[in-house]
Amino acid sequence: MHRYQLHIFLAIFFLAGLACIFVTLYYLPARASLLYGPPASWLSISDRIEYSARLLSHGDVLKSPHNENGTEQKFQVEPGESVSSIANRLEVSGFISNAQAFYDYAVYTGIDLTIQAGDFTISPAQSIIDIAQTLQKISPTDASLVILPGWRMEEIAASLSTSGLEISPEAFLSAAANPPQVLAFASPATMEGFFYPDTYTLPRETTAEQLLDVIARNFVQHLTEDLMSGFANQGLSLYQAVIVASIVEREAIHIEEAPQIAAVYLNRFSIGMKLDADPTVQYAAGFNPAQGTWWTNPLSAANLDFDSPFNTYLYSGLPPAPISNPGIEALYAVAYPEASPYYYFRAKCDGSGYHSFAATLEEQVANACP
């Protein structure tokens, strides 16, 4: 090949490579978003590209009914049933023509986390998209459990009575002592820390074990590659990261401060300094009948001297387990803390709930309220 021809070949090869990159990074996600709506916010960039390509490869299957003359029939989704199982049963039952297309659409849109357990009336005359959206709708016989960020599992147990679920607090706490198998890779001692804050709509007859399995799977679904790589970059295992996030969740009244607060605790942890975290002492102190809360405030000198492995004023390192159930913002704050020289923080004196941060003990003392 002559040098001139080689140059032409290399130029064509280079342009073809650029075209491939453009199609992969821009065209495929943009086209999928136009046709099927935006992807779930927690999908990583690579997942967005992959599932965009998958959706586009299905052509008209997603929007076309399997049988335009089909009649309505009953379809039941079991508590804790996986999306792949639902998709396969829909295809076998003749509701849809392509289980993989249903699965890909559900994961792309995030519907895989919002499909409800219960009885539904659907038809082969509906498209895959219509059926997926129908399976999100709440049945009048369903119960709804709301888990708020920062709750400890006793608070979740106490809320069961208003959820409509037929689960006693005692049965719930007993089941929580044995985390579902889906969390085995994280090796948690109990479910504490892994109750992903969300609204869970389930049949009223859902058992404690089934409820925990649904919640645990929701937690695992939110463990993106970005989140896991962030924990690894901080030198933390998943369990350690959840412990830190559980403390950050209780400290950050304004969640936008979470990355700064996470940085302080990670800075302390990295040099072997005690965390001196009030929420860990509150957790150790347990329920305060006089205040009617699990989170004693203010803490007394006796609280701070209470001998417990959760008391980070007495013991260095992380507490032995999470002390609350962190939301996604606190988890990301630990994965990607704000780079800072701070080792201290305290509440500002204006009652705003914001904090003043300090690099030295002298600065911390100077930030004290008059």
Image: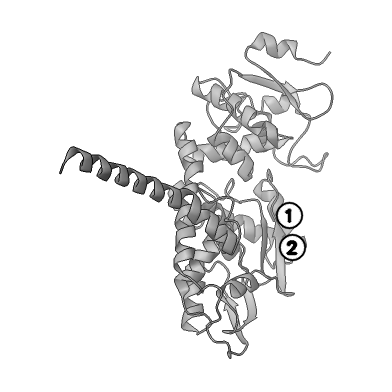
Q: Secondary structure at mark 2?
A: loop
- Seen in the picture, residue 225 relative to 75 is either above or below; the reply is above
Residue 326 pos. (x, y %): 63, 43
User: Can residue 295 be spotted in the picture?
Assistant: yes
Considering every residue shown, the one lying at the far left of the view is: 1
Question: Residues under labels 1 and 2: Cα distance?
Answer: 10 Å
> Left or right of 293: which side holds 77?
left
Residue 198 pos. (x, y %): 66, 54
Q: Which mark is residue 163?
A: 2
> Left or right of 298: which side holds 313?
left
Residue at numbered disc 1: 158
Residue 41 pos. (x, y %): 59, 51
Identify the residue at image location x=63%, y=61%: 171
Query: Looking at the image, is mark 1 or mark 2 earlier in the sequence?
Result: 1
Type of amino acid under label 1: Ala
- Location of the C terminus by quadrant is top right
Task: Looking at the picture, tell me which residue is in the foreground, 65 or 1.
Answer: 1
Task: Looking at the picture, tell me which residue is in the foreground, 166 or 110.
Answer: 110
